[in-house]
Image: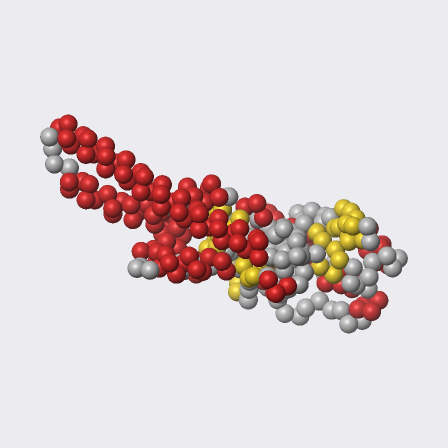
Amino acid sequence: MSTGPWFYVDRGEQRGPVATADLASWIQSARLPRDVQVWREGLPQWTPAEALPEIASQIQAVAFFVMGANGPQGPVDGPILLEWVRAGHIGRETLVWRTGLPEWITAGAVPEIAPYFPAAAAAYAPPAAAVTAREARPVPDRDGPCPLCGDTRKMGPRARVLYEYWVCRKCNLRMTNRRQFAWLLDVVALWAVLAVIAFVLGAVGAAARADVSGVVAVLPWLLYGAWLLKDGFDGHSFGKSLMGLQVVDIDTEQGAGFGASFQRNLPMLIPFAPLVAAFQMSRGPRLGDGWANTRVVWKKYRGRGPF
């Protein structure tokens, strides 16, 4: 029996092909919902991934945590959680969390156990249409805990949007500062390298009594080229590496290559574009990210909320 490659529906668009292991890994990490619509050659129609044995067998059991009166309880697996639901120990509004979720959500919003609540049993039905990964994510809650640090004190009216997620003001500022400082470090590093090369060429030219002005005149163009490709080392530049940041492809979440780096940084050669980008960083996407289909993630919080 064929087990791939697979095609899947994400944000209303068909994507793929991908291997079975990759698809299962994305579902396990909650990047894709368990009922994401998938298809491969040999299947008569699009089918929820969790209904196919060749995918379901590679998805590890998910461990849940339940918010009780005395704090979080767990981890517990799915069958035990269902027993608690049937026994009435967990209500629809009880907060639960599992690996891959950016924040605590109500038990009634968890597809695995939602059908087992008496009040919802009759009304619950699997979605008839394909559910995209973005639609399946929990709705960002401005008044809930920050999906990055878990703090609620700086949410509410002071919360800010980062890649379509509400995060606390502190995390937003920390991310913005890291990106801007990484940019500054990249500028300083590239100019420092350029200055060293110019100094060495000047010293060599003086010793050899040769005119190296033509070679030195080419150095600014080398600087532009280095700037365009600086994020191509698996999404890392000098500054981003020091700041714990990485440029990734939105679809695959893999580090950016030199092609994506060229695309996202080319607009920065336009006059005043860096100034515009500096103000855009607080919300996430900046000039060039749309063209390159990239975003910047804070590796410390990879898998949470906007990252």
The residue located at (28%, 35%) in the rendering is 196
> Where does residue 221 sit, x and y in percent of width and height?
25, 47
Foreground residue among 161 and 288:
161
Specify the color scheme.
secondary structure
The residue located at (38%, 45%) in the rendering is 186
Whether residue 24 is visible: no
The residue located at (48%, 48%) in the rendering is 178
The residue located at (37%, 53%) in the rendering is 265
Q: Quadrant of residue 119?
A: bottom right
> Where does residue 236 sit, x and y in percent of width and height?
44, 44
* Residue 200 as seen in the image, left or right of residue 39: left
> Where does residue 214 sit, x and y in percent of width and height?
15, 42
> Where does residue 156 sit, x and y in percent of width and height?
64, 63
Which residue ends up furthest to the bottom in the rendered image? 123
Whether residue 193 is visible: yes
Which residue ends up furthest to the right in the rendered image? 87
Number of marks drawn: 0
Which residue ends up furthest to the top in the rendered image? 207
| In the image, residue 63 above or below residue 42 | above
| In the image, residue 128 above or below residue 86 | below
| In the image, residue 185 above or below residue 95 | above
* Residue 7 as seen in the image, left or right of residue 270: right
* Residue 24 as seen in the image, left or right of residue 265: right
